[in-house]
């Protein structure tokens, strides 16, 4: 369900742009939330991102929708994961999310846990929808 690619050419050949992208937020911790969730702050298709192909989105949602709640949207509102928009999760939320995943152990959770644990050095992460 989760994919990593050696380069963006491999991602394009596999599925073009038909992915949800998990991306590290590399902005400084003191950055204001409004800037963090700004479209101009996000550069899609990072080499260290984790991807979910469009064919796997329903399985992902059914396994993880209760885990990825409380993300900040581009309009600064908070809610359930928006699979078509920007969702930002803070470092504090990251710890809660990791705990939920490790307790629930949903499909393919280890690849996601490994990726999230590398996020400790960043300012949270994004889930960028289709």
Image (spheres, rainbow, N blue to C red):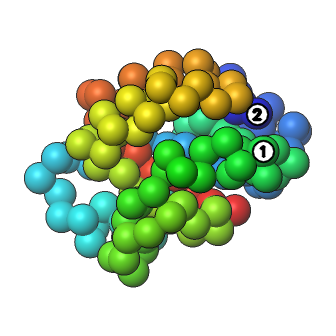
Q: List the single residue furthest toward the bottom.
A: 75
Of residues 64 and 83, the one nearer the viewer is 64
Q: Mark 2: few, some, or many residues within 10 Å (few <14, many ≥20)?
A: some
- Give the spatial CA distance, label 2 vs label 1: 8 Å
Q: Is residue 52 visible?
A: yes
Task: Look at 38% across and 29% down and name the residue there.
Answer: 99
Quarter-of-image position of residue 15: top right
Q: Give the residue number, with chain letter if any, for mark 2.
A: 1
Residue where numbered disc 1 is placed: 59
x and y percentages locating residue 46 in the rendered image = 55, 41
Percent across and percent down for residue 64 are: 60, 44
Would residue 66 be found to the left or right of residue 12 on screen? left
| 85 is higher (above) or lower (below) than 106 | below
* Disc number for residue 75: none
| In-image side of 53 versus 128 (left or right) | right
**Viewer-side label of 2, 1:** 1
> CB under 8 Å between callouts 2 and 1?
yes
- Mark 2: which secondary structure? loop
Give the farthest residue toward the left: 30
Position in image of residue 81 (x %, y %): 54, 61
Q: Quadrant of the C terminus?
A: bottom right
Query: Quick check: 105 above or below 69?
Result: above
Q: First in sequence: mark 2 or mark 1?
A: 2
């Amino acid at each position: 369900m989760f994919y990593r690619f050696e380069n963006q050419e491999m991602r394009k050949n596999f599925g073009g742009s038909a992915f949800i992208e998990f991306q590290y937020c590399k902005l400084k911790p003191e950055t204001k939330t409004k800037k963090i969730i700004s479209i101009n702050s996000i550069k899609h298709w990072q080499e260290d991102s984790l991807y979910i192909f469009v064919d796997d989105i329903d399985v992902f949602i059914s396994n993880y929708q209760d885990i990825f709640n409380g993300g900040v949207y581009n309009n600064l509102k908070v809610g359930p994961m928006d699979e078509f928009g920007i969702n930002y999760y803070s470092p504090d939320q990251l710890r809660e999310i990791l705990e939920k995943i490790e307790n629930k152990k949903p499909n393919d959770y280890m690849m996601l846990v490994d990726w999230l644990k590398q996020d400790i050095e960043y300012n949270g992460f994004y889930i960028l929808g289709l």
